[in-house]
Amino acid sequence: MNQLEQRVKKLEKSLQAYRIFFSTSLVIFIAVVLISSGKKDDVPDIIKAKAFQVVDNSGNVLVLMNKEKGSGQLATYSSSGQKLVRLFTSESDAGAINTFDPDGNLNFKITNNLKGGGYLAMYNTNLKEVVELGVLNSKDGYLQVNDNNGGKLAKITATTEGGGHFSLTKEGKETITISAASPGGRLSIYDNTEKRIGYFGTQSDLSCNLSVYNNSGTRIGGFPTY
């Protein structure tokens, strides 16, 4: 065997060794990839932290979860930093939700009534309560509409007999009331001193009563006549 043939055989052996090496390496690499892709990441069951923030690309806080006055709270913010929604614990240890306008002023609130039951309120731009829904001590519901200064204008609730009651108010004084009593419907009209000057309704014997009064509260006409 001449020198050239020896070199060719040596080269063939080297190429064969390289083929075996690269083939083995490729098989090992593929096996590692397949095993790695089939392995699930460990996910913790509970994540604990004293505060949690979600921020935008500029680092502005958009969502905040933390502790406030000993209880948990969650708040969302606009990109300009104004508070928009807040979930928290009220002073009576009940859940509460507040929403805010673009300037950060309160415009809506849901919480509990201090004497029990739910409570909802809406505010105008002057932070005056203009609408409220809640629960009375009698556990009856009520709806109240207020003027732009928070003064009562109208209220719907229940009578002590369990019927409906509607009243209109001017400067804190009732001027008209409509109620559903046990015998039937009743309408009363009052002057600005809260003296009744007119009444129309159902009497206890289920007959109709219409009465007109003077400014002293004395009945001056109506049906039946007395």
Image (cartoon, rainbow, N blue to C red):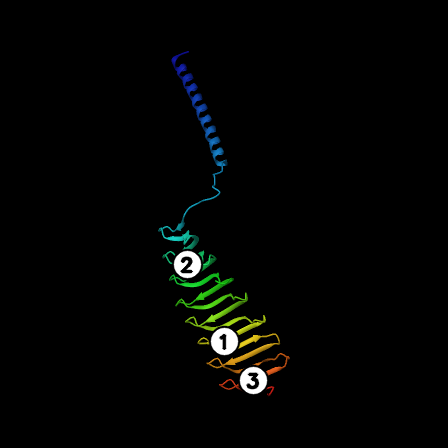
Whichever of callouts 1 and 3 sits on the residue coming sooner in the sequence is 1
Q: Amino acid at mark 3?
A: Ser
Read off the residue under disc 2: 84
Read off the residue under disc 3: 211
Gap between marks 1 and 3, in whole Å?
A: 20 Å
Circles 1 and 3: CB atoms closer than 8 Å: no
Query: In the rendered image, which quarter is residue 99 located in?
Result: bottom left
Indicate the quadrant containing the C terminus: top left, top right, bottom left or bottom right.
bottom right
Residue 207, percent from left and from top: 63, 81
Residue drawn at x 52%, y 71% is 156
Gap between marks 2 and 3, in whole Å?
A: 54 Å
Q: Spot the residue most to the left.
A: 58
Gap between marks 2 and 1, in whole Å?
A: 34 Å
Disc 2: CA contacts within 10 A as few (<14), some (14-19) or many (>=20)? many
218 in relation to 136, above or below: below
Read off the residue under disc 1: 168
Q: Spot the residue most to the top.
A: 1
Disc 3: CA contacts within 10 A as few (<14), some (14-19) or many (>=20)? some
